[in-house]
Image: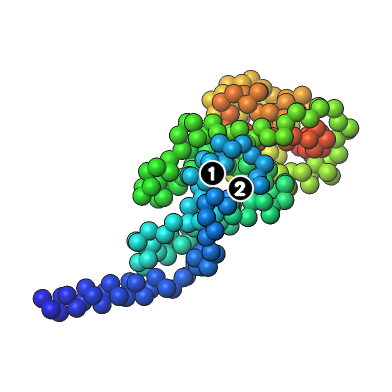
Amino acid sequence: MKRIGAAIVLWAVALTGLAFVHPFGDPRVEHAKGLDTLLQGANMPADAKKVLIAKCADCHSNETRWPVYARLAPGSWLIERDIVEARKKMNLSIWEQMAGDTQDVLIGKIIQEAKSGKMSPPQYRALHWESKLTEADVAMLSTMGKTGQGEASLSGPGDAARGKVVFEKRCTGCHAMEGDREGPRLAGVFGRKAGSVAGFDYSAGLKNSGLTWNDATLEKWLRDPDMVVPDTKMDFHVPKAQERSDLIAYLKR
């Protein structure tokens, strides 16, 4: 019995010691400042801020709560890996330091993933049931896509070169010209029937919309997707009329 007890103690010590090894990086080096410091200057609705802080900050900020089991390897390594990757994709602790275009891309991705049910990840939700987004949470996050709307729809002629820049800044978080990502491939989208890329999981509303992508429908879609198809998975918009014109010119090529 003494040998068994000693073996258990040695095993526990080994696991604890291995927790000081960080094969995927050490997210603990970033010191927490308090949840109340997050998103103070962010230009987004207050209720959306509350949802992000309550449901996303544990992985997507420097305010991670470290439970006891996060101190034991190899489980600690997997937790650290997920947090390091999550902060690379979006870190709410540095939101105000990001460029406006970067924030817009992230907001679009947040809304899309919330609507698709991808937030929070299943391995996190298994231990934190309260992190599951409710319908009300998704609705609150969707309001972030409306911030700053109201610009007049008038613009000059579209420029494809400028449109490429807009695409790379605002769209590549979810889309690529060749190949599907969170959104469908956009090569050849102009003149294509909405919801028709084979193998892509569209919302029923978009598949049954009967839309064909042309100047008029793309303008309306980029201005406010929910006004075109209410149950669409995309809620990212391009608020500036000139950028919409340039983007459409690029997609027409």
- At mark 1, the secondary structure is helix
User: Compared with residue 64, is residue 140 higher up or lower down, i.e. above or below?
Assistant: above
Q: Where does label 1 land, which residue?
A: 52
Task: Judge by depth and name the residue closer to the eye, 203 or 106.
Answer: 106
**Could you say where residue 188 lies in the image, as x and y percent from the top left?**
72, 36
Instruction: State the CA–CA distance, disc 1 to disc 2.
Output: 9 Å
108 to the left or right of 82: right
- Mark 1 vs mark 2: which is more N-terminal? 2
Q: Position of residue 230 (x, y in %)?
A: 59, 23
Residue 39: mark in rendering? 2
| Nearer to us: label 1 or label 2 | 2
Side (left or right) of 208 relative to 98: left
Side of 33 where 148 appears, left or right: right
Position of 147 relative to 16 (above/below): above
Q: Residue at x 45, y 47 (%)?
A: 121
Q: Position of residue 1 (x, y in %)?
A: 10, 76
Q: Secondary structure at mark 2?
A: loop
Which quadrant of the figure contains the C terminus?
top right
Above or below, comparing residue 196 to residue 34 in the picture? above
Q: Nearer the viewer, residue 244 or 190?
A: 244
Eyeballing the image, is 111 above or below 215? below
Using a 10 Å C-alpha cutoff, classify the residue at mark 2 as few (fewer than 14 neighbours), some (14 to 19) or many (20 or more).
some
To which quarter of the image does residue 163 belong? Answer: top right
Identity of the residue drawn at 53% across and 41% down = 50
- Kindly identify the amino acid type of the residue bearing the numbered disc 2: Leu
Q: Residue at x 61, y 48 (%)?
A: 39
Kind of residue indicated by mark 1:
Leu
Viewer-proximal residue among 240 and 28: 28
- How many badges with numbers are in the image? 2
Q: Residue furthest left?
A: 1
Mark 2 and mark 1 in contact (Cβ < 8 Å)? yes
